């Protein structure tokens, strides 16, 4: 296995165990966890850029259009993180994993709608199958699986904007967190002044875990960036299912979430769509195109 594939696999594995980490912070309100994640991520990333003496690449990119792009991606990340952490701490790890299972298909759909990308004929079937699975789950839930859809849509939009974003992964993530740093810091300061803040007022382990959210957030993203540059798209497409698969298993076997037969049918439909999609994607990048 190449270094790039190993880096990507490690990043997806770290994301896969996120539910265990953030469940350890269940006593902290979800919005405070997200605010800490933003603040400490920015401080860690800006320190990393300073150590690398690469501040010039960041300052030279500060233009109105660039700032707007990263403000929007920062907001999308914050919404995604908030829904994800809330889901983990309220017993919806399995539904959160569903969001990341269907995310690749949402990204394909967004590429078609916003970038004018054309679906290969064989891609229409898994896309329609995944939609059917979501509709089936909605019918059995009595409502749309909003957690899964919110996670898939926000991360899909995030990926869409990152395709047109001008900065590299480290500089881009730094600017994203910088764009929402002050509101997050202000929120934490107000919470602390009102006596509702958890930082410094909880046990030492909780305080330490809040500080470490910056490293926990940034390290998988940086490892992912290394893998994405060195690994073929088809391989990345298969590796990305490590994370939701681990989250799904953690939800069932570690946290004991209920998984009914109706949900099994819905998930099975979506899993089938992903299998077909992954095989088609792999073959399309492996087989030579036919001559006209």
Image (spheres, grey):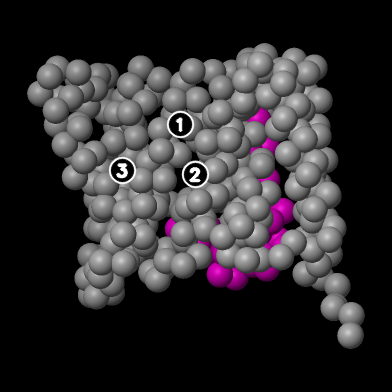
Residue 35 seen by the camera: yes
Dot 2 crowding, Cα within 10 Å, few <14, some 14–19, many 20+: many
- Say whether disc 1 or disc 2 marks the residue closer to the N-terminus: 1
Q: Which image quarter: residue 193?
A: top left
> Residue 151 — which label?
none
Q: Contact, CB < 8 Å: mark 1 with mark 2? A: yes
Residue 58 seen by the camera: no
Q: Which residue is mark 2?
A: 154
Helix, strand or loop at mark 3? helix
Q: Quadrant of the N terminus?
A: bottom right
User: At x 80% / y 47%, what residue is drawn?
Assistant: 126
Q: Position of residue 275 (x, y in %)?
A: 81, 47
Q: Is residue 232 in the magenta section?
A: yes
Q: Is residue 84 left or right of residue 260?
A: left
Q: Which residue is mark 3?
A: 38
Q: Position of residue 215 (x, y in %)?
A: 36, 46
Query: Which of label 1 and label 2 is nearer to you?
Result: 2
Q: Which residue is mark 1?
A: 83
Which residue is at the front of the view, 212 or 128? Answer: 128
Residues shaded magenta: 222-248
Dot 1 crowding, Cα within 10 Å, few <14, some 14–19, many 20+: some
């Amino acid at each position: 296995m190449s270094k790039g594939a190993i880096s990507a696999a490690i990043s997806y594995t770290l994301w896969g165990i996120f539910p265990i980490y953030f469940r350890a912070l269940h006593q902290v309100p979800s919005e405070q966890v997200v605010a800490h994640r933003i603040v400490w991520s920015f401080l860690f990333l800006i320190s990393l850029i300073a150590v690398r003496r690469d501040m010039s690449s960041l300052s030279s990119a500060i233009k109105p259009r660039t700032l707007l792009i990263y403000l929007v991606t920062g907001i999308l990340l914050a919404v995604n993180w908030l829904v994800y952490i809330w889901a983990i701490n309220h017993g919806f790890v399995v539904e959160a994993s569903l969001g990341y299972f269907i995310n690749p298909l949402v990204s394909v759909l967004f590429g078609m709608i916003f970038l004018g990308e054309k679906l290969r004929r064989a891609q229409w079937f898994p896309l329609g199958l995944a939609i059917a699975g979501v509709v089936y789950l909605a019918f059995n839930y009595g409502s749309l699986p909003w957690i899964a859809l919110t996670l898939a849509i926000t991360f899909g939009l995030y990926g869409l904007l990152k395709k047109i974003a001008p900065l590299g992964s480290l500089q881009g993530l730094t600017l994203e967190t910088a764009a929402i740093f002050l509101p997050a810091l202000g929120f934490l300061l107000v919470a602390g002044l009102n006596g509702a803040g958890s930082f410094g007022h909880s046990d030492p382990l909780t305080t330490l875990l809040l500080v470490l959210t910056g490293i926990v957030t940034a390290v998988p993203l940086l490892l992912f960036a290394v893998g994405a540059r060195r690994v073929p798209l088809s391989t990345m497409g298969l590796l990305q299912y490590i994370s939701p698969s681990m989250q799904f298993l953690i939800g069932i076997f570690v946290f004991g979430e209920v998984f009914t037969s109706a949900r099994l049918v819905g998930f099975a439909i979506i899993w089938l769509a992903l299998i077909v999609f992954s095989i088609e994607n792999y073959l399309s990048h492996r087989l030579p195109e036919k001559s006209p």
